Amino acid sequence: MFVQLVSDDVQKLWSEQGLQGSILVSIVLQIMLLLLGNRRKYNPRTLVATSILWCVYNSAYAVIPTALTITAQTTSDVSTRELMSFWASLLFLHLGGPDNFTAYSMEDNELWLRHSVLMASQALFTLYILLLSFPSCSHLPLLSILVYAAGLIKCFGRVQTLRLASTEHHRASMLGLADPGPDYAKLMEENHLKLSQGFIVNIDEFAKHEHSPSAINADQESRSKEIVEAHHLFKKFRPLFVDHILTYEDRDISTSYFSDLDSSKAFRAVEIELGFAYDKLYTKANVVCTNKGLIVRGASVVLILVVLASFYFLSDIGDYRAVEVFITYLALSAEISKEIYALITMVCSDWTDLWLNQRDQTRDILFFQCLKQPTKQRWSNTIPQLDVLSVALNEKPTRVLRIQKLFGVDEYLEKQSYETFTEVSVNLKDMIHSQFKEFMGFMAKNPNEKPLCVHRGSYSLRENECINLLWSTDGVDFDQSILIWHIATTLCFDLAVDDERGSNRVESNHMSRYMLNLLVSNPEMLPKGIGMMRYRDTCADAKRFFNRKGPFTNNAEAYKILSEVKCREVLPSVVTGDRSKTVLFDGCRLALVLMEMKVELMWKVISQVWIEMLGYAAANCGGFHHSQQLGRGGQLLTHVWLLMAHLGLTEHFQVSKGHARAKLIVS
């Protein structure tokens, strides 16, 4: 004897209320995606923000197949079945997603084929549901077909956007036509033929240089001038995002342009470029911001407007319950509101400035003042901070540690609890820009010198006659060098006297904590190493020391006792050996040497070494990982990477001239 676990009444309630609830949830999630799509561009990825965004993105596309399944199982009267098919077409429209949020991460772009299969299957399933409403006695099934057509347009646009943003397509688009070069075999055959005929043959080589592209300069002085010039730069330097090479002509044009910019304008140009990159990778800009895309996109909007008007004037609303009519109007109104919001967002974007500039127009032709001078946030302009000694001092005791360890999230949550954010100041940008330009001048005088991207602090140490400190940069792995200089900077920051300017001290501390945060939270952006192992061992060593010497009233007291350890007489590695990777007392040893310098020189050396390390890390991080960070509020490291490329301080420039040409000289 079989027992029915779910009664017929519960099943009927689920079919009706479950479908209505799913549609409402889908509407809410789509609106949240639309609003979060812009904010993710300039909001730093905290634990809460990441969790919310991940849940909303995955839930928004998980609820649609569930709701469509419920719709297909509804076997009520004809009018209800027609309404269900109409709702199914609206749900399918949601599958196309908002224009400003097509991918959660770069991996979504790489899986564009999987997304296309999913959408194709849902399109066929929705079509099947629509066919169930025929034959009909009302206009609603015809309206369902119109909504379905709009959904096909949006879904195709989303799949096309994912495909165009994939690394494979991006790399293929950079290659162009295959270039076999001059025909060597043919030249050798002619050479052999002439020699066999008794002629004296010489081969004269000459270089055929390709036409140099024009300088980067907008045609007119306007508010959009810097946007037009940044877009021109973006088109030339797009190959960097797939780790392709550039020509020396590109370098010369870029360096000529950036040599006339101060730090503020230089970083702003880079910021605009990365804004274009974000739009290409994470939004539908590849599809919508084209003439064909605008026409097709406009057609889908017209279809929705026609459906709304037709439903109001042609449908017999009395055949449906009030809640069903409310949900239908809500879904249609939400779609139109989303389109209006998307239009306003697009008008406020840099793409509109480009479009107007191509037609010799400015934003002054727009009616509303908010559209004439829109506020544009292109990235978070913040850097995450982490201090290993603060973690070791256990400033923020962990709660419910046993539960966290049970789920294996204790270390992750500990890092998140100590992570803070600070704004990237104008002083820091000035320091980075000025040091890069100083190295450009050095490279101009010494063309055979290695570029900045291969130095990890050694150039600054040699320039400041600190050869005795090279062991902390060249003699160790990069992750080890970060930890050593981080500990030394922290001790100097709290114990040493401030310099007269003050900016070197503050910004050095910010860079120190930022680089350590990258080592712990984004190790994929740094050269391969065992940074996490070194961090854990160093943290454990510091905790043991502080527990043995504590308690302390404040951090400065703990740091003072740590700096009093006699670590210059015997190297720490002699005691710790090779098994433990702690560098705690290597950092103390470095701090003691630094604090013997004059205060101004000490902070000058520390700041320059950190800028050099920042440049080394930026240049040695792949374009894919830089692209990933654009969808997470951005990273200063990515801005430094692109700025270095524009200043010619990376190794991406490898094509110096066109094909070498050879001709036979017969005598």
Image (tube, helix red, strand yellow):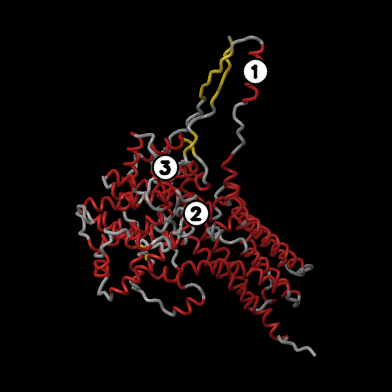
If the image is split into quadrants, where does the C terminus sit?
A: top right
Residues marked 1 and 2 touching at CB (< 8 Å): no
If the image is split into quadrants, where does the N terminus sit?
A: bottom right
Q: Which of marks 1 and 3 precedes in the sequence? A: 1
Q: Where residue 300 appears, x then y in whole percent?
A: 62, 57
The residue singled out by tag 3 in the image is 646
Which kind of residue does numbered mark 2 sit on? His
**Between residues 425 and 280, which one lies in front from this camera angle?**
425
When the figure is inspected, residue 355 is found, relative to residue 199, above or below; the finding is: below
When the figure is inspected, residue 347 is found, relative to residue 648, above or below; the finding is: below
Which kind of residue does numbered mark 3 sit on? His
The residue singled out by tag 1 in the image is 190
When the figure is inspected, residue 656 is found, relative to residue 307, above or below; the finding is: above
Which kind of residue does numbered mark 1 sit on? Glu
Q: Where residue 108 appears, x then y in whole percent?
A: 58, 58
- Rate crowding at label 1 as few (under 14), some (14 to 19) or many (20 or more) other CA atoms within 10 Å: few
Give the Cα distance between marks 3 and 1.
44 Å
The residue singled out by tag 2 in the image is 625
Tag 1 secondary structure: helix
**Between residues 663 and 115, which one lies in front from this camera angle?**
663
- Rate crowding at label 3 as few (under 14), some (14 to 19) or many (20 or more) other CA atoms within 10 Å: many
The nearer-to-camera label among 1 and 2 is 1
Give the Cα distance between marks 1 and 2.
50 Å
**Between residues 577 and 525, which one lies in front from this camera angle?**
577
Name the residue: 61% across, 64% down.
94
Residues marked 3 and 1 touching at CB (< 8 Å): no
